[in-house]
Image (cartoon, rainbow, N blue to C red):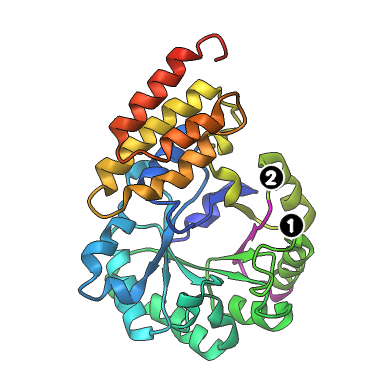
Amino acid sequence: MKNFWEKLPKPFFCLAPMADVTDAAFRQVIAKYGKPDVLWTEFVSADGLVSVGRKILKSNLIFSKKEKPIVAQLFSSNPIKMRQAAYYVAGLGFDGIDINMGCPDKSIEKQGAGAAMMKDMNKAREIIQAVKDGIKDSRKKVSISVKTRVGYNKNQIEEWIPFLLSQNIDALTIHARTRKEMSKVPANWDFIKRVVEIRNGMKVKTKIIGNGDVLDIEDGKRKALETGCDGIMIGRAIFGNPWFFSGKVPTVKEKLKVMVKHTKLFEKLLGKSRNFAVMKKHFKAYVNGFDGAKELRIKLMKTENSGEIKAIVDNFLGENKSML
């Protein structure tokens, strides 16, 4: 298997997979203004990909060469469908396939997928093997990784992590909380340190990626140094700041201009498959922390297309030249 992970710096930085956030438009904006070392798609239902619903889900797997290396994240509890989906995704040219074994969404867990995998190691083993088989069927060189948490209702590191590391996977992302904790408590990076110790003790080459409450690049580097993990995954901190990975601090004008570009790109790439309302969580993130932000946000939340967004932003910038 081709392992692009070996070529990355230490620590490397990744964009976390986030539903209704890390879509094709958002990733292309990130890739232009502050590209991380690895990008992730949103999580995608393997079951859906091998059903008549594939047409709708295809938009989740649009990507450009500028985003590479890029990893597609899949979820399922059905080994047959997971194998078929992995075969399909490998054929699209992704650098890696990641298996979601940590999502706490109840609708995902009801399917036996996401965080529910932590309660059934035999099923988890079957799903990992299914992805390997699908990649093998495709005859493509694609890496395999898993994203999970430290346990379901309690810390299960001593059982769960050695099991995953024994599956010959290229990378393992650990969200430093249990499923029960969701994001209600601070991420515990001592858990990441312990995962690294287990990896080293087992003498496997799997890259360990830490995830949870990373504030900025310097904070990420510090956490990597303290825990020994190979990579850092960033989620919520990227909202409204496509420059995050570059370290640049944008002006209000730059943020608003990029917000308009982001909106136009969303319409171009995803306008036929996604509701425009998906963009509104981004408007909230782009527009804050400056005079007039609240009033501007209220106007933006009433819009229905990128033309309206551009007109409102142009008007705001014209009226606030002295401030900006």
Specify whether 218 is left or right of 259.
right
Circle 2 is placed at which residue position?
Answer: 215
| Mark in front: 1 vs 2 | 2
Determine the residue positioned at 38% across, 36% down. 262
Relative to residue 44, is residue 313 depicted above or below? Answer: above
Mark 2 crowd level (few <14, some 14–19, many ≥20, 10 Å Cα): some
Magenta segment includes 209:
yes
Residue 89 appears at what percent x and percent y?
31, 65
Could you say which quadrant of the image residue 292 lies in? Answer: top right
**Amino acid at the residue labelled 2:** Leu
Circle 1 is placed at which residue position?
Answer: 228
For the N terminus, which image quadrant? bottom left
Residue 199 appears at what percent x and percent y?
69, 70
Residue 270 appears at what percent x and percent y?
28, 49
Asked which secondary structure carries label 1, the reply is: loop
The reply to whether residue 136 is visible in this rendering is no
Q: Which residues are magenta?
A: 201-213
Relative to residue 112, is residue 74 depicted above or below? Answer: above
Magenta segment includes 269:
no
**Amino acid at the residue labelled 1:** Gly
The reply to whether residue 153 is visible in this rendering is yes
Residue 160 appears at what percent x and percent y?
65, 81
For this rendering, which residue is in front, 64 or 205?
A: 64
Specify whether 6 is left or right of 210.
left
Query: Mark 1 or mark 2, which has the lower sequence index?
Result: 2
Could you say which quadrant of the image residue 313 lies in? Answer: top left
Determine the residue positioned at 45% across, 20% down. 316
For this rendering, which residue is in front, 257 or 214?
A: 257
Specify whether 87 is left or right of 168.
left
